[in-house]
Amino acid sequence: MPVRTPSQILEAAHEAGIKKAAATSRRGFSRLLTGSILAGAYIALGGALSIAVGFGFPEAAAANPGLQRFMSGLVFPIGLMLVVILGADLFTGNNALLVPPLMEKRLGAGRVLANWTIVWLGNFAGSLAVAWLLIALPGTLSSGPYPAAIAGIAAAKTSAGPLAVFLKGIGANWCVCLAVWLALSGKRLGEKLIACEIPVFAFVALGFEHCVANMFFLPLAAMQGADLTLGTMLTANILPATLGNIVGGAIFVGLSQYYLYRPRD
C-alpha cells in the first residue's frame, strides 16, 4: 500500500490536531489527562531502556565513544512508538499537530495553549510515576554502572546552560515531530515503527534535549541521591528544553509543512 503524499500527511495531521484539541474540553479532560500520563510513562520507559542498554557496556563504550549513543538511540524510540500506535498525548508531538488547525482558524490560540499545558503536566506525572515506582523504588538501575551513568546524565543536562539546552531542544523536537509526520504517512504497523525509529534515533545519538525524557532522567537522578532540586531541574533544563521543543515542533515541522502543503485555491 503506497504511503501518503506530503499534502495527505498534512491533512491527516490537521484532523489529528482537531481531535486532540477537542479533548481539552471539560467533557474530554479525563481522557486527555489519562493519555498524557500514559505518554509520559511510555517515554520514561524508553528512557529507562536507553540507560540499561546504552550504559551496560562501559568498557566497550570507553574504547568506542559512539557505542553508548548508538545503543541508547537504538532502543529509546520504543517510547514514541507506543505513543503513536496507541494514540497517547505527548506534549512534543502536539506542538506540531495542533499548528495546522490553528493556522486554518479551526482552533484558537487559547485552546492550543490549554492543550499543551495539560499534556505537559500529564507527561510529567507519567514520567515521575515510572521513575519512582518502576526504577527507583525497586532498584531496577541501582547497581553496576547505572547509578554513575544516571548521575552523569543529570550533571551534563543541568550544566550545559539555558541557551545550549534551548537550541538542543529545537533539534530534539524537530526530529520527534518529523517522526510523527513520517508515521502519519504510513498505514501499516511496520511503516509507522520504522518512521518512529530513525528520526528519534538521530536526536538521542546527537544528544539533543527532549523535555519529557528529561522529566524522567532528572528526577530519577535526584531519587538516587544526586544533588538536584526541582528548581534546578526546571530552570537549568526542563523549561528551556520545553521552549526549544515548542520551536522545533511548532515552527520547524507544523508551520513549515503547513506553509509548503496547505490547500490553495
Image (cartoon, rainbow, N blue to C red):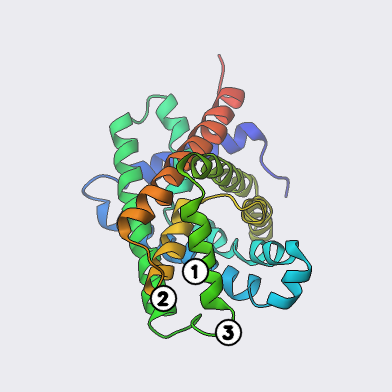
Query: Which residue is identified by label 1?
Result: 151
Q: Residue furthest top?
A: 265
Q: Return the x and y of residue 156 as percentages of the image width and height.
A: 53, 57
Callout 1 crowding tier (Cα within 10 Å): few <14, some 14–19, many ≥20: many
Please state which of residues 89 and 176 is positioned toward the viewer in this rendering.
176
Query: Which residue is identified by label 2?
Result: 224
Distance between mark 3 and mark 1 Cα atoms: 13 Å
Q: Is residue 87 visible?
A: no
Q: Vertical placement of 30 versus 11: above or below?
A: below
Distance between mark 2 and mark 3 Cα atoms: 13 Å
Left or right: residue 126 compared with residue 47: left
Task: For the residues labelled 3 and 1, say whether their Cβ atoms are less than 8 Å apart.
Answer: no
Query: Which residue is identified by label 3?
Result: 144
Callout 2 crowding tier (Cα within 10 Å): few <14, some 14–19, many ≥20: some
Q: Mark 3: which secondary structure? A: loop
Query: Which of disc 3 and disc 2 is earlier in sequence?
Result: 3
At a point 26% along the width and 52% down the height, the residue shown is 29
Please state which of residues 203 and 38 is positioned toward the viewer in this rendering.
203
Query: Which of disc 2 and disc 1 is earlier in sequence?
Result: 1
Q: Mark 1: which secondary structure? A: helix
Q: Quadrant of the C terminus?
A: top right
Task: For the residues labelled 1 and 2, say whether their Cβ atoms are less than 8 Å apart.
Answer: yes
At a point 67% along the width and 56% down the height, the residue shown is 205
Distance between mark 1 and mark 2 Cα atoms: 8 Å
Q: Return the x and y of residue 138 as percentages of the image width and height.
A: 41, 85
Callout 3 crowding tier (Cα within 10 Å): few <14, some 14–19, many ≥20: few
Task: Indicate the amino acid at tag 2.
Answer: Gln
Task: Indicate the amino acid at tag 1.
Answer: Ala
Query: Which of disc 1 and disc 3 is earlier in sequence?
Result: 3
Task: Indicate the amino acid at tag 3.
Answer: Gly
